[in-house]
Amino acid sequence: MANLNSRGLCAGMISTATGRAVAPTGGSDPGNPPPSGGSCTATYRTSQQWGDRFNGEVTIRAGSAAITSWTATVRLTSPQRVSTTWSGTPSWDSSGIVMTMRPNGNGNLGPGASTTFGFTVMANGQWATPAVSCATP
C-alpha cells in the first residue's frame, strides 16, 4: 500500500460492467485528486451539397490536456436523417434525429490534436445545419 500511495495510486478493482479499472468508493483524497479526462471541442462544416443531401464533417479537437476518448453528439432538424457515416461508430436515439458518434479506435488525442468524422444527411427539404458537441468520459 505504501508503494501505491507514494505514486498517487490506490488499490482498486475491475468493473464487471465495463472491464475497466475503478477506484474504490467511500471517500477521496483531496491531496491526490484523480487525473482529469481533459476536454474537447466539436466543429462542424458542410463539405459537399447536392439537390437532396449534404455531407457534413465534424472535427474533434482535444483541449490543453490529452484525452483518451471522446463522444460527439450531432443533432439534426426533423425530417433530416443520416444515411451514411465514416471514421466513427454511430448510434441514434429513438427519434433518429440525435446521433452519438464514438471513435473507431482508441480515441486518444494529444493536447490540441484533432480527428475528423463525417456523415451524409438526407435533407428531406430541411437544410438546417446540424448542431454538434463533444464530451470526454
Image (cartoon, rainbow, N blue to C red):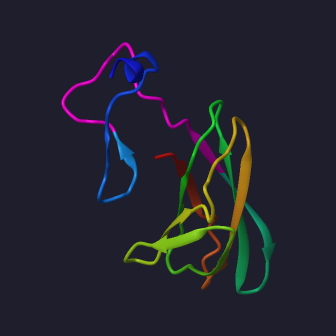
Tell me the quadrant of the picture where the N terminus can be found: top left
Name the residue at 45% across, 78% down: 96
Query: Which percent across, then down, holds residue 46?
Result: 75, 65
| The quarter of the displayed image where residue 8 is located | top left
Name the residue at 64% across, 35% down: 63
**Dominant secondary structure of the residues highlighted in magenta in the image:** loop
* Range of magenta residues: 23-42
| The quarter of the displayed image where residue 113 is located | top right
Q: Is residue 49 left or right of residue 64?
A: right
| Along the line of sight, the residue nearer the viewer: 13 or 93 | 13
Query: Which percent across, then down, holds residue 56?
Result: 71, 68
Name the residue at 26% across, 36% down: 24
In this figure, what is the number of numbered marks?
0
* Vertical position of residue 111 compared to residue 136: above or below: above
* Vertical position of residue 93 compared to residue 63: above or below: below
Query: Which percent across, then down, holds residue 85?
Result: 65, 76
**Does the magenta segment cover residue 31?**
yes
Q: Is residue 57 left or right of residue 35?
A: right
| Along the line of sight, the residue nearer the viewer: 94 or 21 | 21
| The quarter of the displayed image where residue 33 is located | top left
| Along the line of sight, the residue nearer the viewer: 35 or 59 | 35
**Does the magenta segment cover residue 18?**
no
* Vertical position of residue 56 compared to residue 40: above or below: below
Name the residue at 33% across, 16% down: 30
| Along the line of sight, the residue nearer the viewer: 83 or 13 | 13
**Most distant residue in the left direction:** 26
